[in-house]
């Protein structure tokens, strides 16, 4: 990412896939809530953004199921070299509309998540914590940023998402 002379920052995101333990390029969306716009960015391409808060969304399809990752980011005039982290525990559902709730489950690198799942990044910082039974959460799911700080808690009751804190 670098700042150009028009007060905008050119950004290009890559993603660390924890399942494959590799950096990958994927297409993604940049949501600008201030201007109520969404921009689709092709894999490996950069985009010029003014300093502001944005949400980056990545969509992945696997075995005819779909999952999304969201990253809330502040783009400023400082050089940023972070790679966005795609955790192992992923919530997948069918790609068709009106699928029954039982078809939505958490998978850990292709297998239904079961038991305690705690994920550490390459710096030994916690990135994710949760407990599962047959792909359904049996505890709250906690997500952490690259500094190991809790950024989101998904509150589950009887395997159903009740709220996000």
Image (cartoon, helix red, strand yellow):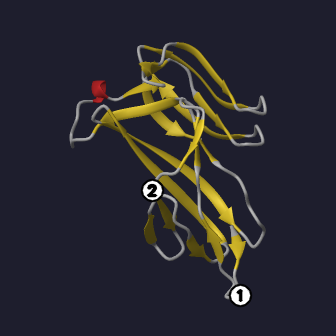
51 relative to 129, above or below:
below
Disc 1 element: loop
x, y percentage for residue 140? 57, 26
Which residue occupies the extreme bottom position in the image?
6
Query: Which numbered tag is attached to residue 5?
Result: 1
Instruction: Compare residues 151 and 25 and report the one nearer the observer.
Output: 25
Task: Residue 42: give x, y in percent of width and height.
Answer: 44, 62
In the visual, does 65 lie left or right of 35?
left
At 59% across and 37% down in the image, what residue appears? 22
The answer to whether one can see residue 89 in this image is: yes
Dot 2, crowdedness within 10 Å: few (<14), some or many (≥20)? some
The picture quadrant where one finds residue 74 is bottom right
Please count the marks in the image.
2
**Residue drawn where x is 69% and y is 84% of the image:** 7
Residue 25 in the figure: left or right of residue 148: left
Alpha-carbon distance for marks 2 and 1?
A: 26 Å
Element type at mark 2: loop
Q: Position of residue 14 (x, y in %)?
A: 58, 52
Q: Position of residue 69 (x, y in %)?
A: 50, 45
Residues under numbered marks 2 and 1 in contact, where contact means CB atoms less than 8 Å apart: no
Q: Quadrant of the C terminus?
A: top right
Q: Which mark is residue 111?
A: none
Where on the picture, by quarter, is residue 13?
Answer: bottom right
Q: Is residue 33 above or below residue 70?
A: below
Q: Earlier in the sequence, mark 2 or mark 1?
A: 1
Q: Residues within 10 Å of mark 1 (few under 14, many from 20)?
A: few
Residue linked to disc 2: 27
């Amino acid at each position: 990412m670098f700042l150009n002379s028009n007060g905008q920052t050119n950004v290009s995101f890559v993603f660390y896939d924890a399942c494959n333990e590799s950096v990958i390029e994927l297409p993604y969306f940049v949501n600008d809530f201030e201007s109520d716009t969404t921009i689709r960015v092709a894999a490996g391409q950069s985009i010029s953004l003014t300093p502001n808060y944005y949400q980056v969304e990545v969509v992945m399809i696997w075995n005819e199921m779909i999952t999304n990752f969201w990253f809330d980011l502040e783009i400023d005039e400082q050089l940023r070299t972070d790679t966005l982290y795609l955790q192992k525990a992923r919530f997948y559902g069918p790609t068709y509309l009106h699928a029954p709730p039982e078809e939505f489950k958490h998978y850990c690198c292709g297998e239904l998540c079961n038991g305690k799942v705690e994920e550490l990044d390459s710096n030994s910082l916690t990135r994710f914590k949760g407990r599962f039974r047959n792909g359904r959460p049996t505890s709250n799911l906690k997500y952490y940023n690259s500094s190991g700080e809790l950024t989101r808690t998904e509150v589950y009751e009887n395997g159903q998402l009740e709220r996000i804190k």
